[in-house]
Image (spheres, grey):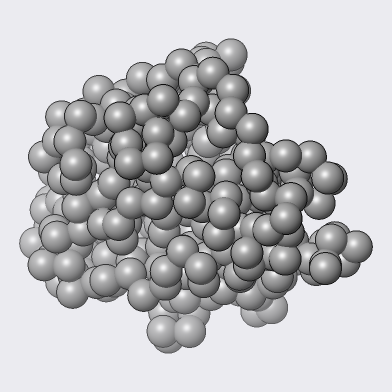
Amino acid sequence: MTWLITGGAGFIGAHVVRAMLAAGERVAVYDDLSTGDPGRVPEGVPFVKGSVLDGDLVRATLSDLSVSGVVHLAAKKQVGESVEQPLYYYRENVQGLQTLLEAAADTGVRHFLFSSSAAVYGMPDVDLVTEDTPCAPVNPYGETKLAGEWLVRATGRAHGMTTACLRYFNVAGAADEELADTGVFNLVPMVFEKLTQGVAPVIFGDDYDTADGTCVRDFIHVEDIASAHLAAARALTEREPGSDLTVNIGRGQGVSVREMIALIGEVTGYADAAAPVSVPRRAGDPARVVASADRIRGELGWTARHDARAMVASAWAGWVRRHPEARR
């Protein structure tokens, strides 16, 4: 069978493509290249440039490539941008998903795996977030992911697809220097940028009810994210038509923002410059968001393999490849 990976030229998507190829799966990539890089698509992998909003192209791609399963990662994902442009986010993330699901149903796709997010939980007041923790997203990005889960499950039940919704926590790292994240929207690359510019990293709020006063997050290596997709995709092929799987992808271990900044300083050689400055809290930042990984371990036999140091070291290798002057 062939898996179509939407967003397969992006940071996470490229890792999923490599993991599935290495495991012997047949894959193809569909990406509009708004943030993706065609150089990330391995030689010999069929590639179609297009938007998931283009129903005719999506339908033709699914049909021409005889696609049996879809791994849907293509989405807009910047929280702040979603607040400023909610209509854009709902169009890209929800309408685009609807268009893709319609085409999948029309062409007989049997399996559909959806890239969701811990943002569906909003600001959970629990030590460990389980899949049964109430979903209460606090921004349009999280809302679009939750609405996407509803669409995927409903379509699966109605059309006999097996479906999965994978809720990522805080993704970092790289399996290869060439696949490293080129964006500066998450904590790790943001700190890299500050340190290499000679500017102190910033902590948004140091008065939370946590051990060191800073927010605590569950950081997960992108290579582990990819292996979880492979495990979920293979599980879908063995499940009953119309069944659904919803799981967190996390390590179940929290790292505070202050701890992560200190680790980044140590790994990069910028420890002397890594003393952060604190500014007031950002609206909507929960104190602690750490995954329970019990369900994915029980359902798929999957466990994260990489720790926070490995995430930082691999991400730093990719950063230095693009900014060689940053090496100390």
Decide: is 77 above or below 283: below
Residue shown at 84% from the left, 45% from the top:
197
Residue shown at 90% from the left, 62% from the top:
325
For residue 215, side relative to residue 190 (left or right): left
Q: Quadrant of the C terminus?
A: bottom right
User: Residue 66 or 196: which is nearer the viewer?
Assistant: 196
Name the spot of residue 239 as percent of width and height, x first.
Answer: 12, 65
Residue 130 seen in this snapshot: yes
Name the spot of residue 258 as percent of width and height, x first.
Answer: 50, 45
User: Residue 273 or 14: which is nearer the viewer?
Assistant: 273
For residue 228, side relative to residue 27 (left or right): left
Picture quadrant of residue 119: top left
Q: Quadrant of the N terminus?
A: bottom left
Decide: is 171 above or below 95: below
Residue shown at 33% from the left, 51% from the top:
254
Name the spot of residue 186 as percent of width and height, x first.
Answer: 58, 43
Decide: is 177 above or below 276: below
Residue shown at 43% from the left, 35% from the top:
214
